[in-house]
Image (tube, rainbow, N blue to C red):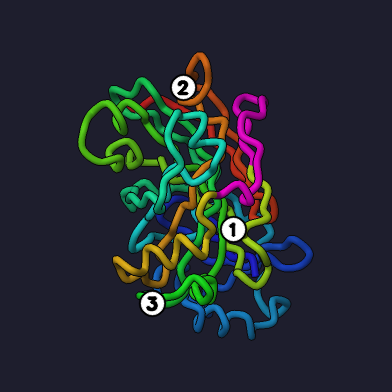
């Protein structure tokens, strides 16, 4: 299934994309997509509904984040071999786990707002993983059984806040609109192998990131298993699994976001995003 949310900010309704590309309104069966409503059990119940029985939405308008909110927005740092190399970092021996404020979550076509004081805004196409059931102390072999689905994420970052201001990376990752997610939550059964997905980002029409999840240092299964040794993952949690080479910080000379820039972001099979940047008021 491809799940999505449509409508104005704060008034989104849950929908399903049918085989013909029509948006179907599923709000009679589920209030919204978030937390327990994207558990594996709830998704299985949705799967039993015939999409043809659902109302067609002729003009869905704005497409929001595929999740209304998230209990936790986790990220994995330096998880592509070529990206680690472009930053001058040694490949990590264990996954680098950090958080992004859940309030950064935004729609895939909403503007990205460059925050006040920002000098080094950056882009990061990432494969997003949504957890589908409580996950604690799981093995790598079983880890993918806990996945509800996958989505496209742009892990927008502010490198000066992240690196030059001390403390944890979360400060450079968490401004409002720094987490465009969606347009779809694609259930795991439709995705297949998460380690063979093309990822791509263009900036103002120029391809700057073009890679495949096969370049990950730690697989999705390894990341989930590793995290579950230290914390309990719950339904609706998102894990952004790292970005490939081609970020602005790694360019020579470095290149950063300015108002009016346009990012087009895609994990092939999971849907494409488009954001224009604007300055904070």
Vertical relation: 105 (above or below) 144 = above
Residue that carries the numbered disc 1 in the rendered image = 184
Q: Earlier in the sequence, mark 2 or mark 3?
A: 3
Mark 3 crowdedness (10 Å alpha carbons): few <14, some 14-19, many ≥20: some
Q: Secondary structure at mark 2?
A: loop
Q: Is residue 184 magenta?
A: no
Image location of residue 81, percent across then percent down:
54, 41
Image location of residue 222, percent across then percent down:
48, 62
Q: Earlier in the sequence, mark 2 or mark 1?
A: 1
**Any part of residue 37 in sight:** no
| Predominant secondary structure, magenta span | strand
The residue lying at 38 percent from left, 60 percent from top is 69
The answer to whether the residues at label 2 and label 3 have Cβ atoms under 8 Å apart is: no
Residue 55: name its quadrant.
Answer: bottom right
Residue that carries the numbered disc 3 in the rendered image = 134
Q: Secondary structure at mark 3?
A: loop
Q: CA distance from mark 2 to mark 3?
A: 38 Å
**Any part of residue 72 in sight:** yes
Label 1 or label 3, whichever lies nearer to me, is: 3
Q: CA distance from mark 1 to mark 3?
A: 22 Å
Q: Relative to 260, is 177 on the left or the right?
A: left
Image location of residue 175, percent across then percent down:
33, 39
The answer to whether the residues at label 1 and label 3 have Cβ atoms under 8 Å apart is: no
Residue 186: name its quadrant.
Answer: bottom right
Q: Secondary structure at mark 1?
A: loop
Q: Is residue 211 magenta?
A: yes
Q: Earlier in the sequence, mark 1 or mark 3?
A: 3
Please give the range of residues in magenta. Answer: 200-216
Residue that carries the numbered disc 2 in the rendered image = 256
């Amino acid at each position: 299934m491809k799940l999505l949310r449509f409508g104005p900010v704060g008034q989104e309704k849950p929908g399903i994309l049918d085989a013909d590309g029509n948006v179907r309104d599923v709000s009679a069966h589920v209030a919204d997509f978030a937390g327990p409503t994207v558990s594996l059990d709830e998704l299985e119940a949705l799967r039993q509904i015939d999409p043809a029985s659902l109302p067609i939405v002729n003009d869905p308008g704005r497409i929001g984040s595929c999740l209304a909110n998230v209990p936790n927005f986790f990220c994995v740092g330096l998880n592509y071999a070529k990206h680690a190399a472009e930053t001058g970092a040694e490949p990590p021996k264990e996954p680098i786990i950090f958080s992004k404020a859940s309030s950064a979550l935004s729609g895939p076509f909403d503007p990205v707002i460059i925050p006040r004081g920002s000098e080094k805004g950056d882009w990061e196409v990432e494969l997003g993983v949504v957890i589908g059931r409580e996950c604690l102390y799981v093995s790598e072999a079983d880890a993918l059984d806990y996945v509800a689905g996958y989505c496209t994420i742009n892990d927008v970052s502010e490198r000066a806040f992240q690196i030059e201001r001390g403390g944890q990376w979360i400060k450079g990752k968490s401004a409002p609109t720094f987490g465009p997610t969606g347009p779809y939550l694609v259930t795991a059964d439709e995705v297949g192998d998460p380690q063979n997905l093309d990822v791509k980002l263009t900036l103002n029409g120029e391809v700057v990131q073009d890679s495949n999840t096969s370049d990950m240092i730690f697989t999705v299964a390894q990341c989930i298993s590793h995290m579950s040794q230290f914390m309990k993952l719950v339904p609706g949690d998102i894990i952004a699994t790292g970005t490939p080479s081609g970020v602005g910080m790694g360019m020579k000379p470095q290149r950063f976001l300015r108002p009016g820039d346009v990012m087009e972001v895609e994990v092939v099979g999971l849907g494409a995003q488009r954001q224009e940047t604007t300055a904070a008021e």
